């Protein structure tokens, strides 16, 4: 059941994408609500997995993969629609690939993504419930805000002529906050992985030296 819910998020994502490109403007007003459903299902699949005893390595990996697809697809689509700058998409995609690759390496060694964080600051930024929730909330608000105003210039030209500058300012603030938190949470993963590799190399050299 949990994996079906995760799959539903995948399907709803591409319905949202199709509507962002193809739907009439008044139908596009549904997109923020659809986005919130996708986000809500992200929490529901984990809850269902725990309640039904369906937690598994595959389910966890599948959930993470769909999370990344949802995030990257939305940034790419919004950039393609010229609703956000293209560099924003590049930052998120680059950070995602680096962090996921490092975490995959850690999982091969039997470590969860959060167990890889050794320093208190790293655990707070990457593993802490507050920062995870804050990061998710910032991205959700940013996506919903941008999608909400996508059809407004056509539906309400007078409103847009009066408030476009304000809306664009809020959009820019949300984007920069999202990017900042993305990097703040990504840097500790890369740094601690690098530090771990350096420690391992020194340990191996020490072992070889004693031989």
Image (tube, rainbow, N blue to C red):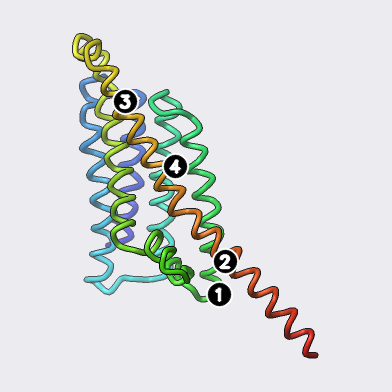
Give the residue number, with chain letter if any, for mark 2: 105
Q: What residue is shown with label 3?
A: 169
- The earlier-in-sequence mark between 3 and 1 is 1
Give the quadrant of residue 15: top left
Using the image as rendered, state which of residue 72 and residue 124 is in the foreground: 124
For discs 3 and 4, the disc positioned in front in the rendered view: 3
Q: Secondary structure at mark 3?
A: helix
Mark 1 surroundings: few (<14), some (14-19) or many (≥20) residues within 10 A: few
Q: Which residue is mark 1?
A: 109
| First in sequence: mark 4 vs mark 2 | 4
Q: Residue at x 42, y 23 (%)?
A: 82
Gap between marks 4 and 2 measured at Cα: 21 Å
- Count residues near mark 2 (Cα–Cα under 10 Å), then give few for <14, some for 14-19, many for 20+: some
Task: Name the residue tied to disc 4.
Answer: 72
Percent position (x, y) of residue 36?
23, 43
Most foreground residue, 15 or 32:
32
Q: Are marks 3 and 4 in contact (CB under 8 Å)?
A: no
Q: Residue at x 21, y 21 (%)?
A: 26
């Amino acid at each position: 059941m949990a994996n079906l819910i995760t799959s539903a998020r995948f399907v709803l994502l591409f319905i949202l994408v199709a509507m962002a490109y193809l739907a009439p403007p008044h139908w596009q007003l549904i997109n923020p609500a659809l986005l919130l459903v996708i986000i809500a299902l992200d929490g529901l699949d984990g809850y269902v997995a725990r309640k039904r005893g369906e937690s598994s390595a595959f389910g966890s990996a599948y959930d993470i993969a769909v999370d990344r697809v949802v995030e990257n697809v939305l940034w790419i689509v919004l950039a393609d629609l010229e609703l956000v700058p293209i560099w924003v998409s590049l930052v998120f995609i680059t950070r995602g690939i680096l962090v996921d690759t490092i975490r995959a390496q850690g999982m091969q060694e039997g470590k969860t993504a959060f167990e890889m964080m050794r320093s208190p600051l790293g655990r707070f930024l990457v593993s802490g419930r507050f920062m995870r929730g804050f990061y998710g909330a910032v991205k959700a608000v940013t996506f919903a805000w941008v999608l909400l105003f996508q059809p407004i210039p056509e539906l309400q030209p007078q409103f847009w002529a009066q408030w476009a500058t304000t809306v664009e300012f809020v959009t820019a603030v949300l984007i920069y906050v999202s990017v900042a938190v993305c990097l703040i949470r990504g840097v500790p993963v890369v740094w601690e992985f690098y530090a771990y590799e350096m420690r391992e190399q020194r340990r191996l050299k020490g072992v070889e030296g004693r031989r």
